[in-house]
């Protein structure tokens, strides 16, 4: 089976370079948060990030996690996602992996989804109302299959 080689730098490499260009040093906590986020397919809370780092043997305090997330957000490297559960979640800003979220209001499960027809509808709306949509986030609330049964 043929292996594919990634095209261009990883999100972590890009984030580290942008932070360095902005004058931030690549410290232990910053590197740990960036490396963890680079492996994620969907949004995590600061608590989730802190717990995951602890599980991997990296003790990074929550204040440091929040500081790094704020730096990344200010530089447009992470997207801050509000899913209506009282906690912000963060995910790498990867235009090529843009997705939205389904939230189960019963169990709290979060399911990322992408829908080309929805993206086309948003683009058509943008043209129809003559509004340049810079970014968007769709969050659909309801009940997952397990909670419906």
Image (cartoon, grey):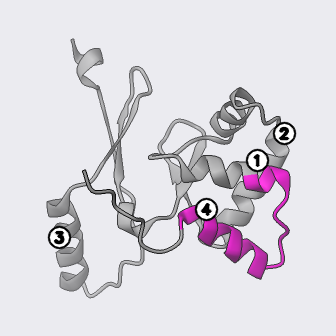
Residue under numbered circle 2? 61
Q: Does residue 86 show up magenta in the picture?
A: no
Looking at the rendered image, the disc whose residue lies closer to the viewer, 1 or 3, is 1
State the residue at coordinates (39%, 21%): 106
Residue under numbered circle 1? 65
Circle 3 — which element?
helix
Residue under numbered circle 3? 120
Magenta residues, start to end: 10-31
The 10 Å Cα crowd at callout 1, few under 14, some 14 to 19, many 20 or more, is: many
In this view, 38 is above or below 46:
below
Can you tell which quarter of the image residue 7 is in? bottom left
The 10 Å Cα crowd at callout 4, few under 14, some 14 to 19, many 20 or more, is: some
Looking at the image, the residue that sits furthest to the left is: 117
- Residues at marks 1 and 3, CA–CA distance in whole angstroms: 36 Å
Residue under numbered circle 4? 12
The first of marks 3 and 2 along the sequence is 2
Location of residue 63 in the rendering, given as x and y in whole percent from the top left corner: 84, 45
Location of residue 45 in the rendering, given as x and y in whole percent from the top left corner: 61, 40
- Residues at marks 4 and 3, CA–CA distance in whole angstroms: 29 Å
């Amino acid at each position: 089976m043929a292996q594919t080689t990634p095209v261009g730098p990883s999100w972590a490499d890009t984030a580290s370079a942008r932070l360095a260009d902005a004058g931030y040093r690549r410290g232990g906590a910053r590197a740990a948060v960036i490396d963890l986020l680079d492996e994620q397919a969907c949004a995590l809370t600061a608590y989730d990030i802190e717990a995951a780092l602890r599980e991997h043997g990296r003790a990074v305090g929550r204040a440091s996690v929040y500081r790094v997330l704020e730096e990344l957000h200010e530089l447009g490297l992470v997207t801050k996602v509000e899913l209506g559960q009282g906690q912000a979640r963060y995910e790498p800003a990867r235009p090529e992996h843009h997705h939205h979220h389904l939230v189960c209001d019963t169990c709290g499960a979060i399911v990322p989804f992408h829908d080309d027809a929805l993206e086309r509808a948003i683009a058509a709306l943008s043209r129809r109302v003559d509004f340049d949509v810079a970014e968007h986030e769709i969050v659909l609330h309801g009940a997952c299959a397990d909670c419906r049964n």
